[in-house]
Image: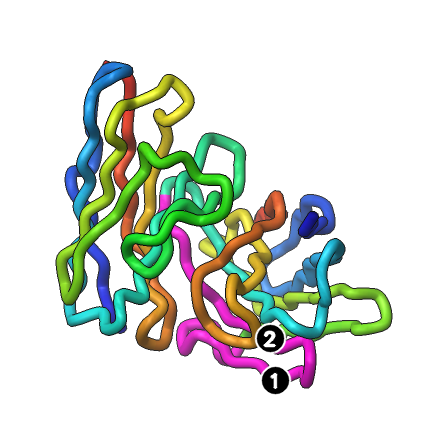
Amino acid sequence: QVQLVQSGAEVKKPGASVKVSCKASGYSFTRYAMHWVRQAPGQRLEWMGWINPGNGNTKYSQKFQDRVTITRDTSANIVYMELSSLRFEDTAVYYCARDGVGATISRFDSWGRGTLVTVSS
Amino acid sequence: EIVLTQSPGTLSLSPGERATLSCRASQSVSSSFLAWYQQKPGQAPRLLIYGASSRATGIPDRFSGRGSGTDFTFTISRLEPEDFAVYYCQQYDTFPVTFGQGTKLEIK
């Protein structure tokens, strides 16, 4: 079955960067896009961007365009999300989520358990 | 971007009752590229409905969705104790993907 295993919680200072990983298993890694979604405390889900693991193409929400980088390692079936210039308001749970159709932007049919990133001085 | 507004914010019902949740889009969502998710405390969201009315794999038939354009509805026909959670709608028709603010379904 599809499994998405994310890296552990992080505590970072303002201005630093964080890199969260998502290891996929149980399906053909290069056939399905991977999305990143975050959820700040008490807030709605917020889509950050996605990657086509097959060719490495990415697309980011304009809100995060200047600060987020999504990459992949096809030899290890891992997708990474790096967020730079962290601010207090970046404190959130970050989820990876598999696209439910393929190398597209559609519904998200499998999710990781989430990685809590806390930005604190 | 498309703004999704869910109502009500909180819905208090008893097990066995029917729950009806609403999701309204700021502009038309074509081809019914709308999904519904359930999220329980400390857990990731779970896909329930996609394409406005299609149930995801393994989702019981007490969950249903309908709608088109700017108005969508999600219904749980008979509430089970495990259904009390937060529900989000999502549109994936227009970039960027957006989510509603959620409806909390609580036990009355």
Marked residue nearer the N-terminal end (1 or 2): 2
Chain identifier of the residue bearing label 2 in the image: A
Residue carrying label 1: A57
Q: Tell me where residue B21 appears, x and y as whole percent.
A: 20, 40
Please name the residue shown 72% across and 66% down the image: A28
Mark 2 residue type: Ile
Q: Tell me where residue B46 appears, x and y as whole percent.
A: 47, 44
Please name the residue shown 44% across and 61% down the image: A107
Q: Which span is picked out in magenta?
A: A43-66
From the viewer's side, name the closer residue of A88 and A52.
A52
Residue carrying label 2: A51
From the viewer's side, name the closer residue of B87 and A21.
B87
Q: Kindly indicate whether the residues beneath marks 1 and 2 are on one polypeptide chain.
A: yes
Q: Is residue A60 magenta?
A: yes
A73 left or right, relative to B86: right
B11 left or right, relative to A25: left
Q: Tell me where residue B13 appears, x and y as whole percent.
A: 21, 20
Q: Main secondary structure of the magenta part?
A: loop
Please name the residue shown 72% across and 67% down the image: A29
Q: Tell me where residue B90 appears, x and y as whole percent.
A: 33, 57
Q: Is residue A85 magenta?
A: no
Please name the residue shown 57% across and 81% down the image: A58
From the viewer's side, name the closer residue of B65 and B108.
B65
Chain identifier of the residue bearing label 1 in the image: A
In the depicted structure, whether residue A20 falls above or below residue A83: above
- Secondary structure at numbered mark 2: strand
When asked about the image quadrant of residue A116, the answer is: top right
Mark 1 residue type: Asn
- Callouts 1 and 2 close, C-beta under 8 Å: yes
